[in-house]
Structures are given as structure tokens and as C-alpha cells.
Image: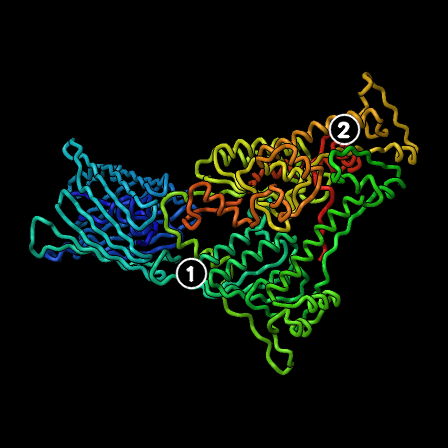
Amino acid sequence: MIYALLIATCLPTVAAADITDATDVRSVSRGVIAAPNNPAAASLVNGSEFSLRHSQASSADENRQWGLYGVFPIGPLSLQLGYEWLHTDLINRRGTIGIGFNTDQSFAIGLNYNYLMHAGESANVFNAAIITAPVSWLSLSFGLEQLNEPQIAHKRLASATWMGLGIRPIKGTPWLTLGAEAYIQLVSDQRIFTTPRLLADFTPTDGVHAQLAYQPDKHEVWLGIGVELANSAVMFRAGRQVEHYGNNIQTTGMLTWRSNPSPNLLPTSHSNVIVQLSGDLKPKAKLFEDEPLISDIILQLYQLAYNDAVIQVTLEIGTLDIKTADVEEIRNAIFALRAAGKYVVAELAFGDEKEYLIAAAADKIRFDPAASLTLNGYSVTLLYFANALDKIGIRFNAVAIGRYKTGPDSLTRAESQQVEKEIIDRILSQLYHQFIASLVNDRHLDFTTIQNIIQQGTITAEQALQFKLVDELSQPTDPSMLPQVRNNGTLLADSLKAAQHLAQHWGQAPVILIIPIVGNITANGIASLFPGDSANAQNIIQQLESARLDSTVKAVVLRIDSPGGEVFAAELIWRAVRLLADTKPVIVSMGSVAASGGYYIATPAHAIIANASTITGSIGIYMIKPDLSGLLALSGINAETRKIGPQADTDSIYKPMADAERASLKTLLAKEYETFIGRVAAGRKLPINQVKKIAEGNVYTGEHALQLGLVDAIGNLSHAVVEACLRAGIDPMSDIEVRIATQNNSFWQLVLAFDKVLKVVPNPFAAILNKLNNISEAPIARMPFEVLVTP
């Protein structure tokens, strides 16, 4: 059924006929089809809609009626216009203008004004209505008509109240809709029920509606049939009194047009959808919002996989600023597209392992002949600053728990330890073998050919074609030939927008909320001293608490891409996750890294899903303390400390760490470490001794972590969403809303943030010292090194 927005009201008055019929049950109809009798339901549209309605009784030409309606949404508001000829002699006419407001498909209000004309007289009429769908199977509506009780033709139009009920008993789907309506009007100071209606609407397939309605007070039975094609719809309905079997048959017909299609017999085809992959793949930030922390491209690609209108997907691959786990996720999404019967073409220009591995997952690779391809393996570069810091008189003292917890080494050592070399070599080896396996499986290359390609490093387009790394060149190499133009297709955003308009449901769809936790975890909101983004625990806890209290959120996916951070901040987030997991399903999706504190906060979840190349584990803890005494000596600065209490200056950054202080810190960290171990054992349901064996700060890939029981499955963000749906008892293929949590910034928040920046600028040296003091005050659960894998 076509849903649109217009507030041309029902006017069951003593002075004018009504253009509605028994099938117009309020709370069931939405959009322009609800225009004649429900100003609130008329506002529930996804775009502009227009409708032409005609009604007549076969026994009386004077009962022929016409109505023209239009709806124009502007954000959450909508302008509604209508004009009706209630008799062929044009004696009765009615003009309507109204406004509607809706927050989403679950609630709307509407107000309108009617200008009624009858035999040269006129009257002003005001109407109001609300509609709500608290759940997907129930719709309730309430309205007031002729609020001002105007007079026309020497008769008062009494005020009236109506109530509507709609039910979708088959799991909230539109296959079967049942409706009922009651109309109460004050007549001779007595409130009486008039024009009650009952309706059954059956939708055997998208775009086809069969209706059966009954109006008890008139003893009328109505049958209706409607068909929708693309942006247009036709509805024909006929009714007659069951007590009489003459020729008195009433009919109603409607033609409707929508700017955005709803489910129909001829769905809009996007046979070729163009997906542009470049940069960090994150969407642009909205006004007064922070930059998005994660990309939703994986979810969008899976949406294409389930869209029957999509035949081909063309990937336009540019230079990518993503990590190896992100590449793995995109590859899995491409395989899902192909498994769903989509033909995937990769348009590649330049690139290294990241770009090529994505292209290799496609059915066909087209390569620009003016470009080159670099496939030379993987490397990690670690920087150690101890010698450089010594030259300027700065040292860092560290206390670490765990044999593999080498986090402080970049500041305390001049070179790597052997255990760190073992970890890095193990990760690089896995990445390298995954790359080799991809070329063998995707491109059917033999090992000798692959070795030859890697030894050459950078190859030309012609060599790539010769090695069968690509299938064809995207442009002619003959200068006498014209360059090829880009294939015609629909951009991904336009395709998803069109598909969204095809959704047809009541109320707020069940929400699966994704909460990103990206960067170094901090407790006080101050940017971390470590490189990369900062994940403010206060903001994350607020999002977790809001999700716990929000009844529309049925499950939560934590998207963790964090090397860890402050232990106390991780503990605060752990508590919030634990509380949330006690009320609704919580699934963790690990990105490129979810280690140390990043793993700590994942442990209360019902399931942890990681990519094969995710870096995780690093169950350990350490503290570092700057020592600026050497810098002060070189600078000729004398630092004098006066104290009361023998330990009052133990946290001073202007003196070396004493043995007693180191022992005290080790005792403190040992307790924090035991807590960490306990969190893992309880969350993963593993024996304490087993956790201790795989802890010690050791780092694992997702594949290895699965074998150790630290994660539950290998998969990407989309798999985590599906798992969240299943654990919440929701069909993943049903109409759900996947929402990524964002932090909205008000105008005053932005002003305050700017004010803080101004206060820091005048004294940057003081700010640096403040950070050094902060970092020495908190235990840290963080990855031992930055995973900067360079292809």
C-alpha cells in the first residue's frame, strides 16, 4: 500500500459528504493514502507524494466526488495540501493545509486547517491527530475533529473524537494487517458511536494488496485490490450494503505517485553499483559531531549482497589508509557478494598488498596501464629512544608484569628484546603466508611465480597482466584508440538510499547498536601520551549506559580497535560492559588490534569475534616513570624538594626511581595483574592457571587466539551484527536498524573545547610536563609495540 503524508481530514459532517470509505481505517493507512482522515499518519513518508482519489455511487451521479492531495516533507516536518470536490455540481468543496511532525516511523503528530464551502457559505475547521507504533505489530491512533465546532448552512458541526487500532499478527510483517476504528460524535448532547470500521489487508507479495472491510452501521462490505509499480500505485475498491441486492454499488479509485518507491512488483533496479574505496573509508562527519571512529563500508557491502536488484558491483580502488585486518574484512565482504550471486569487478590503479588483496577477491581485476603494482612483502619498523633521551638527560624507569610485556621498551631500551623479536616475526610470518595463500586461491598462481613477483617488488601493468595478477587493462595502450569512459552505474550511497525507502514497517525497527572503542584508553579525557587516537572512558561508559536503558536497543556490538591504555579506565569500561551484558546481548568485534586493555574490556561480552589477522592478547601490565634529573643537570637547573613523610616524593619526575619504590610498584602491579587475569578467566570461562600460561603479555593473532580460547570465532563486523541479532532473538534478515553510536557535540561544548585549547597554547612546556606527570601516576595495560605493518 502506498504510504504518504497529507493532512486532508475526515469530515463526517451533516453538511458535506465524506470521500473516504470503509477501507480507510485509521492507524493502518499511512502517507498520502491517509490524507482524507488522519493528519498524523499522513506525515509518515520518505519523500514527496501525490494522490488523486475518485468516489461515486452507481445510483446517484450527484454523489460523485474528487480529491487531490500532496505531501512535501522537509526533515521531520511536512507540508500537506489538499483540495476536494464533494459533489459534481461543485456546491461542496474543501481546501486543506496542514503540517505534520514525526521523529521516526514510531510516532507522529499532525494539525490541519480546512476551508469548507457549501452552497455559497463557508466555514473554518481545525483538526488534530497523533499516531504511534510502540512495537512493530501494533499501531494506535487518536484524533480530534472540528475542534472549533463551526457553523455552516445554519447547522453546527459538532466536535468528534476517533480512535484507531492496527495489528500485524504475523511477527509484525505486512503480510496480514487487521484494523478497527471507532468514531465518537456529540449529537444532541449525547455521545454516540458512528461509522465504525473493520479491515483485513492481505499482501501476498510486494506491491499487491487485497482488502476486505466491513462497516457495521451501514451494513456495507467492501473489497479492494491495489497494485504498485515503481513510483506509482493504483487502488480500486468497491462496496455494497449486504441487506440489499440492488445495483447500489459504491466505488473508490486512487492514483498515487511517490518520489521514492516502496515495495512494488517492479522494484527499482541497480544492476551495477559502484563502490569507491579510498582513504580510511570512514564517512564524513555530520554537523556538531565528532569524526566517525569506524567505517561502515563492511555493513554496506553486506546490504548489497542481500539486495536482489543488484547484479554487479564495481569496486573503484584508490590509495587506502587502512590496516591488514580491515583488508581481511573487506575481502570477506566481497566473497559474500560473490556467494550471493553478484558479479564483482575491481578497477585498480597503483597499489600495494592492501589494495591488491582487495582486488584479488573480485571476479575480475581491471588494471590501469599507466599504473604500477608493488608487491614486496611486509615489514615492521620499531623505534627505540633510550640513547637519544640519554643525550638530553631524560630517562624512563619502568616496572612490568609479564615476560612479554615490553611496552616500555621503546623509551627504556636502545634495541628490542628477543621475546619482542619472536612476537613480531610470528605476526609477519602469518601475514606473509596469508598473502601467499590469497594469491594461490584467488589468482591460481604457483609458488614459484609468486616468489618471482615478490623479488621484483614493483611491476608494470603489462607485467601484471603477463603474471596473471590482473585479467585485463582498463584502457587501450594504442594511442590511436579513444580512452574508455567509466561504466554506467549507481553509486553505493544512492543504491542504499533507494533500498532504505523500500522498507515497510511500523514503529522503530529493532536497533543493533555498534559502539566504537578506538585508540588509547584514557580515564580523564586527556589525550594519551602514546601515538594514535584516544578513547575517553567517560564517553564510552555513557554510551554503554544509554544502550542499557534504551528499550529500542536489542543488542550491542562493541567494535574494539585499541592497543589498550590506563588500567583504571579499562576497569571502569569493564564494569559498564558487565552491567550491559546482564541485560542484553553484547558481542565484541575486534578490528586490527584489541590487545591488553582493549582485550580487558572485551572479556564480559557474550561472544568475541576477531579477524584472523587481529592483534590481541597482551595480557599484562606495566608502569613507566620519567626521570628528568639528567635534563635538569645538563640545563643547570637545581630542583629542591621539601617533604613531610618518607614517601612523599616517590612520584617525583625529577629524581631516579629508588629500589624500594620499584619493589612497591611491583607489588601494586602484581595485584592489578591478578585482577586482569581474573577478569579474563571469568569472562572466557577458563581456569586461572590456563590464563596465566597464555598471559605474560604475549601477543597473538586472532587465528592463534581462537585456538587458545581467547576469542570465539573468526569473522568481521557484519558477522558480529548477525550474532547479536541471533542472541537477541531477531531474524538477521528481518527489518532491523544497525546504528553506530556517535557523540554529538553541542555549540557550547565546542566553545568550551576551544577555550581549553586557548588555555594550553600559552605554555606548551607546562603541558608536556603535566602529561609526563600523568603517565607516571597510572598503571598501563597496553600493547608492547605499535603494529605499523608496512607492505
Q: Which residue is mark 1?
A: 308
Residue 575 at least partly seen:
yes
Residue 639 image position (x, y, % from top left):
88, 27
Q: Quadrant of the C terminus?
A: bottom right
Label 2 sits on what residue type?
A: Lys
- Give neighbour class at mark 1: few <14, some 14-19, many 20+ (Cα, 10 Å): some
Q: CA distance from mark 1 to mark 2?
A: 60 Å
Q: Say which quarter of the image contains residue 617.
A: top right
**Residue 744 left/right relative to 56:** right
Q: Residue at x 54, y 53 (%)?
A: 298
Q: Secondary structure at mark 2?
A: helix
In this view, 654 is above or below 563:
above
Q: Amino acid at mark 1?
A: Asp
Residue at x 52% of width, y 49% of height: 719
Residue at 22% over, 49% down: 23
**Number of numbered discs on residues:** 2
The reply to whether the C-beta atoms of the residues labelled 1 and 2 are less than 8 Å apart is no
Please give the residue where the numbered disc 2 appears in the rendered image.
666
Residue placed furthest toward the bottom: 480
Relative image position of residue 606 (x, y in whole percent): 53, 38
Whether residue 388 is situated above or below residue 239 in the rendered picture:
above
